[in-house]
Image (cartoon, rainbow, N blue to C red):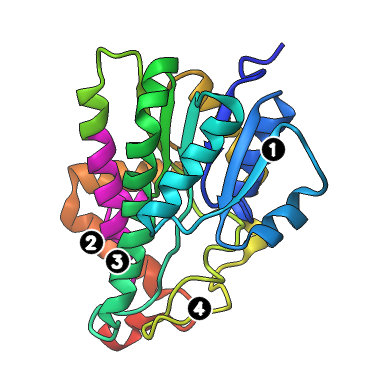
Amino acid sequence: MSTFNDKVFVITGGSSGIGKALTETALAQGAKVAVCGRDVKKLQAVFGGANDNLLCFKADVSIEEDCQYFIEAALQKWGRIDVLINNAGISMRALFEEADLKVIKELMDINFWGTVYCSKYALPAIKRSKGVIAGVSSIAGYRGLPCRTGYSASKFAMQGFMESLRTELLHTGVHVMWVCPGFIASNIRNVARGADGSAQKETPLDESKLMSPEECAGIIIKGIENRKRTIVMTGQGKLTVLINKLFPSLADNMVFKHFLKEPDSPLVGYK
């Protein structure tokens, strides 16, 4: 029997990519899952017909009330929450100099405040179950990435929030953790914001060479089961974190050169 049989998961941003894979993986392990997205019809289409173990809920995590109602809906249906996975997020690709400030605000509202709101309203239930609060972060939460200023800021903020929360809850039985996937074959780059806030609608990466959302979700679920402190998934990610810690000036140059090589890199003008 799975560790998560009859446990209640709450997952944000489940319409595609990692969130969709997390939902499917948790369900396959016998969990009950409440999943949210801004388009509930899309959620329902993604996960098929009626399922007593699944709750699809319309919520925009940048709106506090939506997060509150989402958590309350999960509690009303099942009476408990064992795992909260703050997965919802968007990215960006634009020079800070050229980016409309509304882009930075939108990323903070979704990536950071969405995590804060859901964690706030789920915490009493998770304390009762001695459960887990997890956040899907990024290497950008350890190392600022050029042309991703808002994204990096939001992930740094998420990780700082979760580290503080973990320390507060150290003796309560609640486990707080974050995971940092590398580049994943998902929809996040297709909807990443450009300088004017519109979706870029194309990815600069070869998605066929990236880790699949299903593999990523499996690592996350296993990490939650084992109550890992943090997970940095790829060798490239681990090396980046290490070099940035030990040789920050070297990391500056390496990261700049890496992102300069992207197709149509905004950094070309700064070369």
- Residue 230 visible? The answer is no
Q: Residue 152 lies in magenta, yes or no?
A: yes
Dot 3 amino acid type: Gly
Question: Which secondary structure lies at badge 1?
Answer: strand
The disc placed on residue 199 is 4
- Residue at 32%, 53% (x, y): give it: 112
**Image: magenta residue range:** 139-163
Q: Quadrant of the C terminus?
A: bottom left
Give me the C-alpha separation between circle 4 and circle 3: 15 Å
Dot 2 amino acid type: Asp
Q: Disc 1 marks which residue?
A: 54
Q: Disc 3 marks which residue?
A: 150
Figure check: 204 above or below 49? below
Q: Disc 2 marks which residue?
A: 252
Figure check: 65 above or below 29? below
The disc placed on residue 266 is none
User: Which x, y percent locates residue 57?
Assistant: 60, 50
The local crowd at label 3, few if under 14, some if 14 to 19, many if 20 or more residues have their Cα within 10 Å, is many
Figure check: 194 above or below 44? below
Depth check, mark 3 against mark 2: the one in front is 3
Q: In this rendering, would 45 be left or right of 196?
A: right
User: Which x, y percent locates residue 107?
Assistant: 35, 64
Dot 4 amino acid type: Ala
